[in-house]
């Protein structure tokens, strides 16, 4: 059975905050969006222009790096329009929902070249490899579905193309993200493992592997994947929280305390992290620290699911008053 763990708590908080921000007119905020632009063969496109447009038509523009990557900081939460263009390629326009709290899935876009109509259209080539018409049509249908955020159709067609092109990293990455957006985490992790076998430093794939393994209670595999990701590239505290919960459930409160602390370092107002660290410290007989953590939890989430339990533990740790004053 998959644990809801940190995800439910974080999403609940995010909904409230995003709703409050939705009325703001300025496009600036706390959201971060990153991604990659490639050609149809899976090669990175340097110098492509990525334009983020807020509801008022304003927003930042950026050009991709030599590796085809880009990153935007300081975006407001909500629905954005994203235009991706490059000389010699067809421009793509997509809608993208930005969260200011949760980790936003990367934007991975393939641009089709601008070509003149050919008389002979039966010869198809992807990444220098000749493919069948069915595979070429599957990729086209998948890319169109991707642009429309139709993740089920996109995933199904990328899977068709992968039958003939099983090692194409671009197709694997698209299938991975489409599966993740469909909450088919086990399927996404399967693609992620294939990607990491080719590119061991793929941050997105490593985090998907870590999250899935930890959700399934596979502590060693989840921690091994997470530790391969540089700490500065982890913006979502969820994996740390989930790792701590796994250690706590395995009766290893000292390790649990460590990872709950790392979650708090990433997000100092993450109520659940204080609650679980308080439990770990209580088990370690660090009563003063445990009490401080549980009080912080109650302060941050006074009506939370664990508020009554936290208050009872705090009361149990408080010294009884003398009858004689």
Image (cartoon, rainbow, N blue to C red):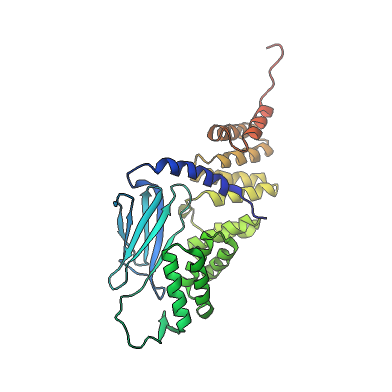
Q: Quadrant of residue 323?
A: top right
On the picture, is 3 further left or further right than 122? right
Q: Where residue 262 appears, x then y in whole percent?
A: 54, 46
Residue 228 visible: no
Q: Quadrant of residue 82?
A: bottom left
Q: Nearer the viewer, residue 199 or 80?
A: 80
Q: In the picture shown, does residue 155 fall above or below 237?
A: below
Q: Nearer the viewer, residue 94 or 131?
A: 94
Q: Where residue 107 appears, x then y in whole percent?
A: 42, 61
Q: Quadrant of the C terminus?
A: top right
Residue 248 visible: yes
Q: Quadrant of residue 280?
A: top right
Q: Quadrant of the N terminus?
A: bottom right
Q: In the picture shown, does residue 259 fall above or below 310?
A: below
Q: Where residue 63 appears, x then y in whole percent?
A: 31, 62
Residue at 50% across, 68% down:
153
Residue at 48% across, 81% down:
134
Q: Nearer the viewer, residue 12 or 3?
A: 12
């Amino acid at each position: 059975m998959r644990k809801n763990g940190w995800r439910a708590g974080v999403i609940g908080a995010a909904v409230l905050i995003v709703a409050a921000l939705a009325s703001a007119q300025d496009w600036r905020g706390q959201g971060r969006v990153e991604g990659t632009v490639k050609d149809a063969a899976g090669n990175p496109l340097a110098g492509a222009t990525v334009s983020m447009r807020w509801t008022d038509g304003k927003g930042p523009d950026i050009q991709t790096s030599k590796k085809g990557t880009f990153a935007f900081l300081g975006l407001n939460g909500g629905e954005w329009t994203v235009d991706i263009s490059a000389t010699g390629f067809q421009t793509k326009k997509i809608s993208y929902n930005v969260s200011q709290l949760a980790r936003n899935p990367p934007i991975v876009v393939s641009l089709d070249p601008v070509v003149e109509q050919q008389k002979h259209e039966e010869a198809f080539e992807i990444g220098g490899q000749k493919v069948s018409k069915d595979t070429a049509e599957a990729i086209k249908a998948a890319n169109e579905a991707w642009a429309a955020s139709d993740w089920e159709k996109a995933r199904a067609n990328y899977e068709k193309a992968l039958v003939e092109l099983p090692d194409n990293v671009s197709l694997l990455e698209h299938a991975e993200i489409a599966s993740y957006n469909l909450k088919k985490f086990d399927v996404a992790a399967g693609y992620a493992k294939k990607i990491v076998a080719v590119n061991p430093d793929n941050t997105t794939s490593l985090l998907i592997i870590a999250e899935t393994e930890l959700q399934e209670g596979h502590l060693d595999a989840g921690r091994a994947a997470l530790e391969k990701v540089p700490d500065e590239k982890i913006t979502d505290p969820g994996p740390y929280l989930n790792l701590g919960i796994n250690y706590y459930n395995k009766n290893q409160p000292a390790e649990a305390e460590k990872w709950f602390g790392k979650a708090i370092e990433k997000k100092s107002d993450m109520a659940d992290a204080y609650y679980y660290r308080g439990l770990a410290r209580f088990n370690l007989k660090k009563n003063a620290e445990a009490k401080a953590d549980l009080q912080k939890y109650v302060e941050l989430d006074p009506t939370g699911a664990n508020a009554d339990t936290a208050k009872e533990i705090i009361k149990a740790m408080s010294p009884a008053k003398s009858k004689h004053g």
